[in-house]
Amino acid sequence: MNYKKIMLDRLLDKFERSKASLEEGIGPRRIMLKCCASDFPEYDIEKNDRRELINSIVIDLHKQGILEYEWMKYEQGNILNRVWLRMEAIEETYREAGRTPKRDVIQRIAVLVDTTYKKICTPWIKVFLAQVKEQIEQDKQVGRFLPNEIDMVKALLDALCFIDEKGDEEYLERVFSIRCYGDSKFFEKNVKKRLIKIIKNYFMEDQIEAELATEDEILGLAGIVKTPEQVEFCGSLQGYINGKIVDFSAFQKGSIIQSQTVKDIEALDLGEIKQVLFIENKTNYVEYVNRMKKAEELVIFHGGFYSPIRGLFFTKVYTASLGSGIRFFHWGDIDVGGFAIYQRLKANIIPTLEPFMMDVQAFLSKEKYWLKFDEAYEAKVRKLSSNIDYKEFYPVLNKMLEVKCRLEQEAFL
């Protein structure tokens, strides 16, 4: 074990948490380690060989002018009490530890962020980088979204640049990783978690959605997907794709199309369709198509928070309906997530959307399947019950608060 490296790193970590590491001329309180304490548990006075080795390391560092030290009372030359940095030799301490000063690291990160900012066009990425720049200038800190290691900062910025350059193109997660880093697993191991946090805070405008969306759904918003995106629907729908007419009405139990096909759709013809129903849960979608679907109805599997590809298909369906009087409905869980999914679809794509089996009557009809919720969840329900965007759900939200229960869509199977 490299005790010298451990000791110097601990001291420099303490130093870097002080203002003195970032601003010239500040005289900090003494930066020290107490040897016989949790500061430096490796210094075990019961293990003579180790204690004597560390004693010799400290004495050598003192001779180099890097450290000061003191012995425990009545244990002169035997047991160390504490060691501390000589501030006038801080640069030499960094060299001895093989570290780059934090101030220099932050300056290099600032240059990387500024260079990236100048070539980015995507608005939410520019906002994020602008705030990082501002925090570095004001606080001399990289903030909570960036790592402190230059290599990892560069990797994260490379991911943001790639997202910016690819536009609406969709990439499988591992393909994205290969294209960015030449390694199919590098993104998942080193960048994914931080990128998800950035997307949640800077791309997702609705805080409720950001809290409820899964990691896969969040990455999907940036066009990075675990598996190829598919859209599922059932109904008498015709599509004009690459100059040809495709009649989906022949598929009585539903159709599935790939993401690229969604992009290739030039127009849709809804024919005799009078109602479009979005269904959140896959099992409910299949059951509805098999047992309850009406001839004049188009049923679409919605899933969770829709990706850009699904959103594109939903938009093309709604555009094709304009002027026809077609009604749009959404059926989801009677819970915070179900309401948020409904609201997102209504706010962003289908302003005429109506809830289906998500009211008080539906809730009361399945009392035996109610799921109790805790105080934390109750706070989320209460927040929706006073949010004007969710006013059409006020009655059922109030009933949920009264009985402290929610209901999943599967209860209706």
Image (cartoon, rainbow, N blue to C red):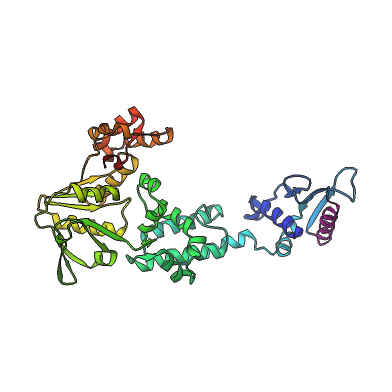
Residue 394 within the segment the image draws in magenta = no
Residue 337: image x %, image y %? Answer: 34, 43
Location of residue 278 with respect to 369 vertically, above or below: below
Examine the rendering and report whether any part of residue 248 can be seen: yes
Q: Quadrant location of residue 54?
A: bottom right
Residue drawn 90% across the image and 51% down it = 77
What secondary structure do most residues of the magenta stretch adopt? helix
Which of these two is toward me, 61 or 25?
A: 61
| Left or right relative to 166: residue 273 | left
* Number of numbered discs on residues: 0
Q: Position of residue 300 (x, y in %)?
A: 22, 53
On the rendered structure, is 239 left or right of 224?
A: left
Residue 120 makes an appearance in the image: no
Judged from this view, the residue extending furthest toward the front is: 291
Query: Which quadrant of the rendered structure holds the C terminus?
Result: top left
Which quadrant holds residue 141? bottom right
User: Residue 323, how many percent across, how many down?
Assistant: 10, 53
Tell me the quadrant of the picture where the N terminus can be found: bottom right
- The magenta stretch spans which residues? 47-65
Residue for point 78% across, 59% down:
66
Residue in front for this viewpoint, 395 or 297: 297
